[in-house]
Amino acid sequence: MEKNYRIKKRANDFSQNQALEPLKKAPDEADTSRTDIKRARKRAAISVCLNFILAFSKGLAGILSGSSALLGDAIHSATDIIGSAATFFGLWLAGKQHPSFPYGLYKAETVATLVTSVAVIVAGYEIARRALLGPDTLPDVKVALPVAVASLVITLAFGLYQLRSGKRLHSIALEADARDYLADGLSTAVVVVSLIGAYFGLRLDRWAAGAVSVFVFWSGGQLLLRAVRDLMDEAIDRETEREIIGLVESHARVEHVLRCLSRTAGGRFILDLDVVIRSHSQELADKIAHLLENEIYQHFPRVVMVSVKPHSRQSTHFRRLTPVKEPGGPIEPHLARAPWFLVETVDRKSHETIGQEYVQNPHWQEETKKGLLVGRWLLGLKPDQVVVAEIKEGTAAVLLKEAGVELILAKDPASTEQDNYGLKSSC
């Protein structure tokens, strides 16, 4: 009885980022995180010293010039010393390990951010109090203005530098410290404007101090909200979560992700995933789970801890791929050079073919990296078995084996009968 084969030409739309690459040694996520923390700690120490210099300079100039706005700005910088010191302590503690804290001490950064936010809010209150109750006088511009301008330039420059460092090192404590600097810069800019007005006889000092307090309150409130959300185990952002699930589900043996639980810890991510894997072997399922954990570490450096719990399940059917020279033709001995692949859906109990189609290999004529490209493309078809004429340690075969795909030997590669290859497992 003649069979009607369905031929399908498929473009290579399997994303390179979603493909399972050759197994590499996953970077030690703990070492990477500790290195970032050490770098962040150095920047936090610099921040403490700089804040001390700024607070002392503005405070002295504020007292000598009689500027309540500049003195309030100095109080803001003084509280920044407390915040920067808390940031440094939090980063120092986050790099430590303790058996009583199996999930790490990353939230020490969050506690430091919380302390910083409280210090900033207290500073805002003090500045507002001085603006409302302080004397309305004209400050000595010759003393106050040069110090205020120099402080503004230094504060903005270091704040932007600290913000870039925090994003690069994935440190919420450094980012909090940077935003505190930028808020301080805005308040100093208001002070500079008031001092310029004082030069022309305008009494803007108290108004400037009030404006400074608004900036400070807003900055502190934002930091407080962020710290509280992190302490309450906020989940990671939805976009990143979708990317992680997409990476896992792109694996050839993964059916779907049952559950993805996540939480943040000091700007870092901790994940627990339940994954359904098409396999009758728990040993194979555990191996695939380990591969998935390594893949997540490689693609998402902010993940410091991930646990993939495999749920092995054998479906009622499986997918088998056979490399062929042409639709209805014989097996192609070289896996990567096969122009076509026969894709069969086979009933697991009766071993009857319940569906089949021919898919054209888009990479069979590539000059370089053919095995890698074909291997990734084949993984995108999510096969359970791949028929081969002989077992070779080519790139495509290695990719398939590492992904848990079973390679099946054909007894008679020259046969043109698609249903009579005489298959036998290579395992």
Image: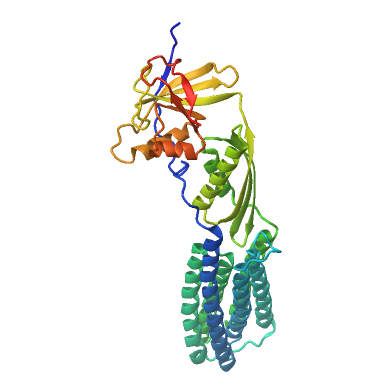
**Residue 184 seen anywhere in this rendered image of the structure:** yes
**Residue 13 seen anywhere in this rendered image of the structure:** no
Q: Residue furthest left?
A: 367
Q: How many marks are shown on the rendered structure?
A: 0
Q: From the image, which quarter does the N terminus lie in?
A: top left
In the rendered image, the vertical position of residue 414 relative to residue 379, given as above or below = above
Rendered residue at 66%/62% (across/down): 225
Q: How is the image coloured?
A: rainbow
Residue 8 percent across, percent down from the top left: 41, 22
Which sits in the foreground, 128 or 242? 242
Residue 29 percent across, percent down from the top left: 54, 58
Which sits in the foreground, 89 or 154? 89
Q: Residue furthest top?
A: 1
Whether residue 92 sits left or right of residue 129 in the image: it is left
Residue 127 percent across, percent down from the top left: 65, 79
Quarter-of-image position of residue 188? bottom right
Quarter-of-image position of residue 174? bottom right
Rendered residue at 51%/89% (across/down): 141
Whether residue 338 sits left or right of residue 343 in the image: it is left
In the rendered image, the vertical position of residue 126 relative to residue 342, given as above or below = below
Residue 116 percent across, percent down from the top left: 64, 72
In the rendered image, the vertical position of residue 384 relative to residue 349, given as above or below = below
Which sits in the foreground, 94 or 290? 290
Which sits in the foreground, 367 or 331? 331
